[in-house]
Image (cartoon, grey):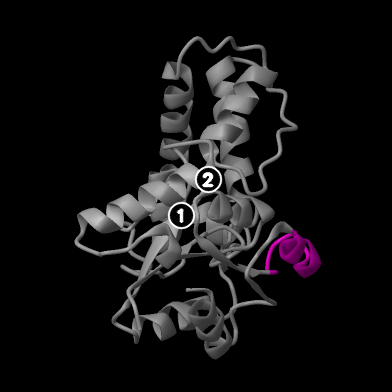
Amino acid sequence: MTTVLVLWDLDLTLLDPAGFGARMIAPTLADFLGRDPVMGASFAGRTDRAILTDLLERNGVELHDDEMVFALMEAVARRCEIFGHDLLAGGGGPLPGAHEAVAALAEYPRLHQGIVTGNMRRTALLKLRLCGFHGLPDPGLGAFGDHHADRALLVRDAIAAARTRGLDVSPEQAVIVGDHVHDVRGALDAGAACVAVATGRVSADDLHAAGAHAVLPDLTDPDALLTAIHATV
């Protein structure tokens, strides 16, 4: 089998954040603004950079450059680290079959597991640690939501990171595993494949319609996941 880069989404694919991000962002934004914030931005499937930029604009902040967005991302990441216990206390944790799926893929030396997530790097690493993912998927083979608003750019960055690690992979040898149409579109726009899982708030029909190469109900059948990955590359 050729070398394959499997890039995992995190929220509602490998783990359930149970609203952790929203609970961290709202009070951080209030402190940042010095008043109760206007919320209402869509979080699903978007990168933290896109979400926080949207929220600042909704609250009348004129963004002449990225400095304020970076400052808010730093403040949110810091609050997440301080209140990390709230993720599990609020009902979050690994999704059924997630650990077993990662372990099953790890049995194949030519399958390399990385990350493409809308989460900022610091919050992604926190969630992985709290949910018991130690070392796999590999954060060094990945890209995070503080880098870009466009998920296709994250996919390309993750492939570039893999190549700097000596992995001879192209977009055609990359498979995104995610739960949202944004994951599917990001994969397709970057020239990669997508195996979608209907573990989030998007139906299997909508994931198929978005162009996913395969759609699974969840991660509880590692053999089905392996078959789907092998069929796409």
Residue 201: name its quadrant.
bottom right
Residue 204 circle label: none
Quadrant in the picture for residue 113: bottom left
* Label total for image: 2
Q: Residue at x 53, y 67 (%)?
A: 14
Amino acid carrying mark 1 in the image:
Val
Binning the other alpha carbons within 10 Å of mark 2 as few (below 14), some (14 to 19) or many (20 upward) gives: many
Q: Residue at x 75, y 32 (%)?
A: 40
The local secondary structure at tag 1 comes to: strand
From the viewer's perspective, tell me whether residue 186 is left or right of residue 158: right
Asked if marks 1 and 2 touch (Cβ < 8 Å), the reply is yes
Q: Is residue 74 above or below residue 222?
A: above
Please name whichever residue, 40 or 202, is drawn nearer the observer in this view of the structure.
Answer: 202
Residue 106 lies left or right of residue 18; in this view the side is left
Q: Residue furthest bottom?
A: 223
Where is residue 208? Give x, y as percent: 73, 66
Residue 12 appears in view: yes
Q: Position of residue 10 (x, y in %)?
A: 52, 59
Q: Quadrant of residue 196?
A: bottom right
Which residue is tagged 2?
Answer: 151
C-alpha gap between disc 1 and disc 2: 8 Å
State the image coordinates of residue 220 (x, y, percent, origin top left). Answer: 60, 84
Camera sees residue 140: no
Q: Which residues are magenta?
A: 198-209
Residue drawn at 57 percent across, 55 percent down = 188
Report which residue position mark 1 lands on: 116
